[in-house]
Amino acid sequence: MLDRRQALGLTALGLMSPGLAVAADEPTVETLRLWPGAAPGGEAVTVTPEVIERSTDPGYHDRIAKHTRDPLLTVVRPAQANGVSLLLIPGGGYRWAVVDKEGMDCAHVFAAMGYTCYVLRYRLPADGWAAGPDAPLQDAQRALRLVRGQALAEDRSPEQIVVLGASAGGHLAGLLGGRRDATYAAVDALDEASHRPDALVLLYPVATLTDPFAHAGSRRELLGENPSPDRIAAYSLEQMDWQGAAPTFLLHAMDDTAVPVENSLMLADTLRRDAVPVEMHLFEEGGHGFGIRLIEGRPAAVWPQLVQGWLGRRGL
């Protein structure tokens, strides 16, 4: 674990310093580059980064980030911090990373509850990175370590880091919670810290990559057109060894036709098998990818309060 002097030293070097505020109406929003130099394994990467606005309504954003080469964290700071950090990993089927729906929208809700929120914009596995399917996980592990270091430097607890992942971001968050091995060589003192979360929240997660319940698009983007059974098993969350992993919260809608509810059910069985504390909430309706805005006025709209209550009972 980093000590406070190391964290403050990294801040002085500029490795943990925030960027410019994103907009005048969002004074608590900052950006952090994930890596002190180029992201690892990018020698063969030739893609051009894009951020695309899908919303035609001036009242809200619905952006997606494609072909990210310089992964980053967007920080949303609460008016009154409760000492807990929340790393948000949005979905996008590993074709892109959602910016707003499961990122900034959720961050503003949880920041209002007191959580210091970090939205991850991660690299994509099919863009030519040397690590292939582990490129997004490299970013997630690095992001969690950066959040730990910044928490220490800002007098928040470095042992109170919650990760919230949605859809394919839930799969990535699950890999972050379940995998024990570091996926990149250390680049600075931040990498001395643990890369595993202290609590895990998975919102309609892609869990299994096996048929008939796999999300075919996520599997294809992550592992290619015809992955071997061993490869599929290695990246299926319900087939991993979760012993010693952080307490986990699962939430899913029963009418999800994109990522069937069996993904959460199968993962819950594995977590129970491996004695991981787990809480699961299933809603009759909600579909997939609802985030915050798309579930307003429906029963599943209470999910942020359910997460807050669960975290509170765990001292977070």
Image (cartoon, rainbow, N blue to C red):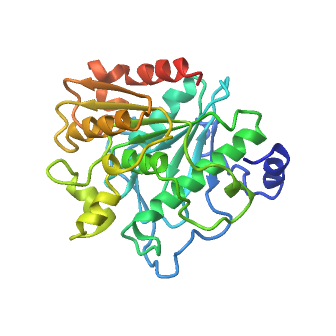
In this rendering, is residue 124 above or below 146? below
Task: Say above or below: 201 vs 124.
Answer: above
Residue 285's spot in the image, x, y percent?
20, 26
Q: Residue at x 19, y 23 (%)?
A: 284
If the image is split into quadrants, where does the C terminus sit?
A: top right
Towards the viewer: 56 or 20: 20
When asked about the image quadrant of residue 57, the answer is top left
Asked whether residue 189 is in view, the answer is yes
Lateral position of residue 27 relative to residue 154, left or right: left
**Tally of numbered tags:** 0
- Residue under the image location 37 percent in, 50 percent down: 240
| Residue at the image position 69 percent from the left and 38 percent from the top | 158
Residue 123 in view here: no
List the single residue furthest toward the bottom: 44
What is the x, y in percent for residue 258?
20, 44
Determine which quarter of the picture holds residue 61: top left
Q: Residue 104 appears at what percent x and percent y?
A: 48, 39
**Of 211 and 39, the residue lying toward us:** 211
Q: Horizontal and vertical percent for residue 230?
A: 28, 65
Name of the residue lying farthest toward the left: 212
Left or right: 82 with respect to 135? right
